[in-house]
């Protein structure tokens, strides 16, 4: 059995490659500059924007995992994501390869994100959200038509070891490490779920090697109850041995900070995710696969340890 990770260079791709070895499979890693994670990994250099290259990358594989992370920019997403999804769908259809698409929650209705399940209404409020809604619908339409076997695995915002460019890392951990105040985006009094990256990778591997997961949307395991912003910062500060000092950043300040922190430049249109409760429910996956998400206190401890290295 051979499985392929498309967009293998990010934190999810790295951990996913390790998890897939538990299923005694040969792993092919595909990116512009692939590097081995396991000793016997196959490396395939390709740009996912190239139709022929994607087809060759998928050829001979049973399951493909699309975990690519594009530059966090709406213009880039609008131009490139539809092309990539078309290329991957066609390659999987041609080579009879199952597809796992690693997705986010940007397409959900902003008024419903206080309790997100797989049935959350799709009503994107941002350009990036509209892109994700379009490509997810395109994939599931192909599934319903019987043209492809696929599933969608969705995660909330990330945190965890190796996730150095996340919002939590950029605005909290890195600031505390420099003895600076954290800059919490939005209202620190409202709950905000974060998905622990090792859990997300493990669950994605489980889905790709399951019999019952196909043709569905799955929320990847995420601890409950969600901590609020102040609790996140207090727990992180405690692990780092610093005082939990912070500023609550409104949309205008985020815009200014974006001049200096690249990931924040595209955040104003996503601000709605931080000014109200953002709670991610993964109970469907947890019950089906008997999976208990890593508690936040444990995940925070491991994340801080990783940042100290």
Image (tube, grey):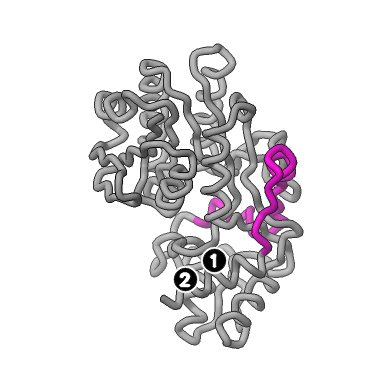
Please give left or right for residue 260 compared with residue 135 in the image.
Answer: left
Along the viewing direction, whichever of 98 and 247 lies nearer the viewer? 98
Q: Quadrant of the image for the N terminus?
A: top left
Residue beneath disc 1: 168
Please give left or right for residue 152 compared with residue 84 in the image.
Answer: right
Residues under numbered marks 2 and 1 in contact, where contact means CB atoms less than 8 Å apart: no
Tell me where residue 189 appears, x and y as whole percent. Answer: 73, 68
The magenta span reads 267-295
Tell me where residue 175 appears, x and y as whole percent. Answer: 49, 78
Give the number of the mark in front: 2 or 1: 2
Please give left or right for residue 245 compared with residue 113 in the image.
Answer: left
Q: CA distance from mark 2 to mark 1?
A: 14 Å
- Please report the residue visible at 60 percent of the width from the left and 69 percent of the height from the top: 300
- Please report the residue visible at 46 percent of the width from the left and 47 percent of the height from the top: 16
- Please report the residue visible at 57 percent of the width from the left and 36 percent of the height from the top: 207
Residue beneath disc 2: 306
The quadrant holding residue 229 is: bottom right
Tell me where residue 5 appears, x and y as whole percent. Answer: 39, 39
Q: Would residue 159 be counted in the magenta stretch?
A: no
């Amino acid at each position: 059995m051979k499985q392929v990770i498309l967009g293998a260079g990010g934190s999810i791709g790295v951990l996913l490659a390790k998890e897939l070895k538990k299923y005694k499979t040969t792993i092919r890693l595909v990116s512009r500059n692939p590097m081995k994670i396991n000793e016997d990994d196959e490396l395939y250099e390709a740009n996912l924007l190239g139709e022929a290259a994607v087809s060759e990358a998928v050829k001979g594989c049973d399951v493909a995992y699309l975990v690519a992370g594009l530059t966090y920019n709406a213009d880039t997403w609008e131009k490139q994501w539809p092309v990539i999804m078309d290329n991957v769908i066609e390659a999987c259809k041609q080579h009879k390869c199952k597809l796992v698409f690693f997705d986010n929650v940007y397409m959900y209705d902003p008024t419903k994100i206080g309790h997100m399940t797989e049935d959350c209404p799709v009503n994107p409020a941002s350009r990036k959200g509209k892109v994700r809604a379009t490509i997810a619908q395109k994939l599931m339409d192909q599934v319903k038509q019987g043209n492809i076997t696929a599933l969608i695995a969705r995660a909330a915002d990330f945190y965890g070891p190796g996730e150095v460019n996340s919002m939590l890392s950029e605005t909290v951990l890195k600031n505390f490490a420099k003895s600076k105040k954290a800059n919490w985006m939005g209202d620190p009094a409202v709950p905000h779920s974060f998905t622990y990256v090792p859990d997300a990778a493990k669950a994605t591997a489980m889905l790709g090697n399951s019999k019952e997961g196909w043709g569905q949307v799955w929320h990847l395991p995420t601890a409950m109850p969600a901590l609020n912003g102040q609790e996140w910062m207090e727990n992180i500060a405690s692990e780092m041995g610093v005082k939990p000092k912070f500023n609550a950043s409104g949309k205008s300040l985020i815009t200014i900070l974006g001049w200096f922190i690249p990931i924040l430049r595209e955040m104003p249109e996503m601000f709605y995710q931080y000014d109200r409760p953002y709670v991610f429910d993964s109970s469907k996956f947890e019950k089906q696969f008997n999976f208990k998400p890593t508690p936040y206190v444990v995940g925070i401890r491991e994340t801080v340890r990783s940042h100290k290295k």
